[in-house]
Image (cartoon, rainbow, N blue to C red):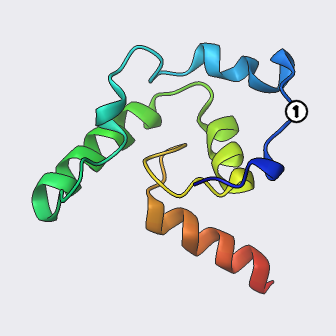
Amino acid sequence: MAATSRLPKPVSEAWHWQLHAACRDVNVSRFFHPENERGSAREDREEQAKQICAGCPVMRQCREHALAAREPYGIWGGLGERERRELIDRRHAA
């Protein structure tokens, strides 16, 4: 679960970027793996999600939100779970 203490206050300006997200009308199952999904099925779904992110006008804001909140699951801002963990670890090591 994301650490809610790191989330921005519930002010519409802090979340306004989400209104412009390319994923806004896409089923969330594209971005979050079902239980026991493995191998090529997971890689294919993640790649499809990342392609949606690649064309998103608010990808940077989404990525920064996910890193700040330490979102543990799903594709956020074009990054998967492992990619976000690695970036967070590098930021804390620096």
In the image, residue 89 sits, relative to residue 2, either above or below, namely below
Image point (74%, 48%), residue name? 4
**Percent coordinates x, y for residue 84 in the rendering:** 56, 63
In the image, residue 88 sits, relative to residue 52, either above or below, namely below
**Percent coordinates x, y for residue 34 in the rendering:** 24, 47
Foreground pick, 76 / 29: 29
Q: Residue furthest left?
A: 40
In the image, residue 46 sits, relative to residue 90, either above or below, namely above
- Please count the marks in the image: 1
Foreground pick, 80 / 35: 35
Q: Which secondary structure, mark 1?
A: loop
Q: Residue furthest bottom?
A: 93
Quarter placement of the N terminus: bottom right
Image point (70%, 44%), residue name? 65
Amino acid on which the number 1 mark rests in the picture: Lys
Image point (18%, 56%), residue name? 37
Image point (14%, 65%), residue name? 39
In the image, residue 70 sits, relative to residue 8, either above or below, namely below
**Percent coordinates x, y for residue 42 in the rendering:** 20, 55
Q: Indicate left or right for 48 with 70 as reference.
A: left
Q: Indicate left or right for 57 with 78 as reference.
A: right
Q: Residues within 10 Å of mark 1 (few under 14, many from 20)?
A: few
Quarter placement of the C terminus: bottom right
* Residue 51 image-quadrant placement: top left
Residue named by callout 1:
9
**Percent coordinates x, y for residue 46 in the rendering:** 30, 49
